[in-house]
Amino acid sequence: MIWENSTYLWFLLLLPVIYGCYWLYKRYQNKRRMAYFDDRLVKQLRKNFWQTGDKIRLFSLMAASFFFIIALAGPKIGTEVREVQRKGVNLLVALDLSRSMNAEDVSPSRLDKAKFELNRLINRLQGDRVGLLVFTDEAFIQVPFTTDYSAFRMLLDISNTDQMPTSGTNFHSAMERALESFKSVENQGNAANVLLFVADGENHGPNYRSLMEELIDKGVIIFSVGIGTPEGGPIPIYNNNGQLEGYHRDAQGNTVTTRLGPETMRDIAAAGGGEYYEIRSGSDNIEPFFSKLDELERGEFSTQEFADYKNQYQILLSLGILFLLVTLFFPDSISDRNLVKKRFKKEQ
């Protein structure tokens, strides 16, 4: 047997305390009564008092409290088989890990803000399959399609610009890898395929239009998130101790300024049948994407059966109610007891 909320069992310790307080109160009452009245007068005044009925009412109240506390703790005895269906969409996140994502025109940085928003997205998913694609000049599948959100979070958190062999930005490579990923996934129940493209809009690769059209022909809906500001900012260089050493410079020694390219990101979303979202400050978010995701068709990925302990609180709750009714309606005087006896004899 296990408990749903075993903490409530500590309330059982209150029952002997309550009984002890009741006993002390009765003893105190008797002492005060005997100080003012003799035994004959007390018996005369308490002629209609039924001591046995009073004890039964007290016992019923304590028993009701006992069963209510046990029921509240949620005892689970035995097992029951449950069937769980996983329904959702296939969501592939393409995350830009180029050097420009380290720019801090969006606090704390473009990449950190992107990862924060993606973690918020994962917290909202229920049954959806999600994958992570990271890209610069080259693209890699960091997380294949999975429903293991903990693994996704872990691999997302360790994603950084230093892990990639190059530092440019190639949308063509990202689209190509995304197409391969969607072709490899088994689409059950006509689940919607969604590509969430997260980048700052700077593309230095070949034309990606034909690959994007292939994705669209396959039924992939493309949403895009542009991170950065039109004014842009320099790309900081930090040492291993986290101290700022300077900023990236071009061949002429000028500080490189990276800017958001909203036109490219907006065109990708418009062509892909999705929407474009823009993050220009630390307070911006992709909240509208959550509601759009809920509107998409969800397929049934799998049906699983698992055994779980069966909650048996109902029996204890019923016993508690029964004893509570006894407490409320059991006669506590001789006249009431005799009246009950007469009614019982008539019914027989």
Image (spheres, rainbow, N blue to C red):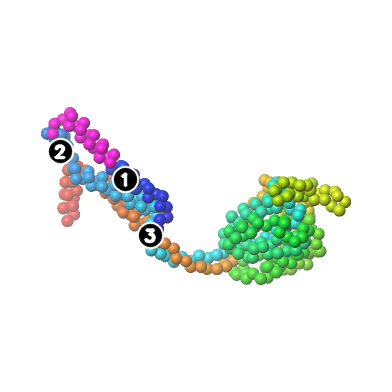
Image quadrant in which you'd find residue 270: bottom right
Residue 289: mark in rendering = none
Residue 231 is at least partly visible in this image: yes
- Give the amino acid at mark 1: Leu
| Residue 233 highlighted magenta (yes or no) | no
Residue 49 image offset from top left, x and y in percent: 18, 40
Residue in view at x 34 percent, y 48 percent: 12
* Numbered disc total: 3
For mark 2, does the 10 Å Cα neighbourhood hold few (<14), some (14 to 19), or many (20 or more) residues?
A: few
Q: Secondary structure at mark 1?
A: helix
Residue in view at x 42 percent, y 55 percent: 4
- Look at discs 1 and 2 and give the one toward the viewer: 1
Report the front residue among 342 and 323.
323
The secondary structure making up most of the magenta span is: helix
Quadrant position of the N terminus in the picture: bottom left
Q: Earlier in the sequence, mark 1 or mark 3?
A: 3
Residue in view at x 48 percent, y 68 percent: 305
Q: Secondary structure at mark 2?
A: loop
Residue 74 image offset from top left, x and y in percent: 39, 55
Direction from residue 265 to residue 40 in the image, left or right: left
- Give the amino acid at mark 2: Lys
Q: Which residue is mark 1?
A: 15
Residue 238 image offset from top left, x and y in percent: 73, 49
Residue at mark 1 to residue at mark 3: CA–CA distance: 23 Å
Q: Which residue is mark 2?
A: 47
Residue 26 image offset from top left, x and y in percent: 23, 37
- Give the amino acid at mark 3: Met
Q: Is residue 100 above or below residue 304?
A: above
> Which range of residues does the magenta coloring cover?
20-39
Residue 1: mark in rendering = 3
The residue sitting at the top extreme is 36
